Image (cartoon, rainbow, N blue to C red):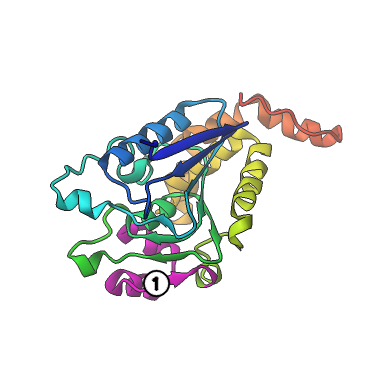
């Protein structure tokens, strides 16, 4: 049987493909496998960015495998919560979702847990949980109101209404909308731009945002300046912080060492 999750390293980029026909639904075993992959990505010093996408052109993911759940499967999601990423709070490397089709329920929640979203023009996003007696508790009910205007988020959460790719872009939920044939190239281009940046700077950006985004600006400054974002302190004490200005002055590309 084909592995439900396939990976490929492309330099410093890890590409992750969910492949569970027909709808790329995520059962417990698949969630645990994704957790292993994302935790390994977190801990691998050679990897800088991950792209998560799915096989086929209809579904990014239908979310939780309801047939498995109805059969009594235990909801043992594994490391990182559902789909391995929705509760992986100590990840300081960017993840890009390349959404090739419908992102439904937990599939949408996986995309919301990513830092950037590139969507095929046929992609749609929706959270149907209230229509089956659930709520989107793998992050949808928490993240969506922070990513969209509250009225739009509430309508989606309370009715299960759909958001197409064009409206998702207009509302700032996705970074780019491209044709299906251009999806992987667009995600890779974003990943390569991140890889070209200083790795400690990328980690510091993610950590400062994680530590401060719920705080008023004055308290956020205080948190950043008083050691509550250790990745920021590591950046300021690093060789790379000196390398960047030096390379600029010498009119050459910087050589990042991550230290």
From this view, report whether residue 17 is shown above or below residue 200.
Answer: below
Number of callouts? 1
Instruction: Please tell me which residue is depicted at 68% across the width and 38% down the height of the picture.
Output: 196
Q: Which residues are magenta?
A: 140-166
Instruction: Please tell me which residue is depicted at 22% across the width and 69% down the height of the picture.
Output: 131
**Residue 176 at least partly seen:** no
From this view, report whether residue 22 is shown above or below residue 14.
Answer: below
In the foreground, 56 or 197: 56
For the N terminus, the image quarter is: top left
For the C terminus, the image quarter is: top right
Mark 1: which secondary structure? Answer: loop
Please give the residue where the numbered disc 1 appears in the rendered image: 162
- Which quadrant would residue 62 be assigned to in this image? bottom left
State the image coordinates of residue 228 (x, y, percent, origin top left): 43, 37
In the foreground, 49 or 104: 104
State the image coordinates of residue 235 (x, y, percent, origin top left): 59, 32
| Outermost right residue | 251
What secondary structure predominates along the stretch shown in magenta?
helix
How many other residues sit within 10 Å of disc 1, few (<14), some (14-19) or many (≥20)? Answer: some
State the image coordinates of residue 91 (x, y, percent, origin top left): 44, 37
Instruction: Please tell me which residue is depicted at 64% across the width and 38% down the height of the picture.
Output: 195
The answer to if 165 sits in the magenta stretch is yes
**Residue 143 at least partly seen:** yes
| Outermost left residue | 72
């Amino acid at each position: 049987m084909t592995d439900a999750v396939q990976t490929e390293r492309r330099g410093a980029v890890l590409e992750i493909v969910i492949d569970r026909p027909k709808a790329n639904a995520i059962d417990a075993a698949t969630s645990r496998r994704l957790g292993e992959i994302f935790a390994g990505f977190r801990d691998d010093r050679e990897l800088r960015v991950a792209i998560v996408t799915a096989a086929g052109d209809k579904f990014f993911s239908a979310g939780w495998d309801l047939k498995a759940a109805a059969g009594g499967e235990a909801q043992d999601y594994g490391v990182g919560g559902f789909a391995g990423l929705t509760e992986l709070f100590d990840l300081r490397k960017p993840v890009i979702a390349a959404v090739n089709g419908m992102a439904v329920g937990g599939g949408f929640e996986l995309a919301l847990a990513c830092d950037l979203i590139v969507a095929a023009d046929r992609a749609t996003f929706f959270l149907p949980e209230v229509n089956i007696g659930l709520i989107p508790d793998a992050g949808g009910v928490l993240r969506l109101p922070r990513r969209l205007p509250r009225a739009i988020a509430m309508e989606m959460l309370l009715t299960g209404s759909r958001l197409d790719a064009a409206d998702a872009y207009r509302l700032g939920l996705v970074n780019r909308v491209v044709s299906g044939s251009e999806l992987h190239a667009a995600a890779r281009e974003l990943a390569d731009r991140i890889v070209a940046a200083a790795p400690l700077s990328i980690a510091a950006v993610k950590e400062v945002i994680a530590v401060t985004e719920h705080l008023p600006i004055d308290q956020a400054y205080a948190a950043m300046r008083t050691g509550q974002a250790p990745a920021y302190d590591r950046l300021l004490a690093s060789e790379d912080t000196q390398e960047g200005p030096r390379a600029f002055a010498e009119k050459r590309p910087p050589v990042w060492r991550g230290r």
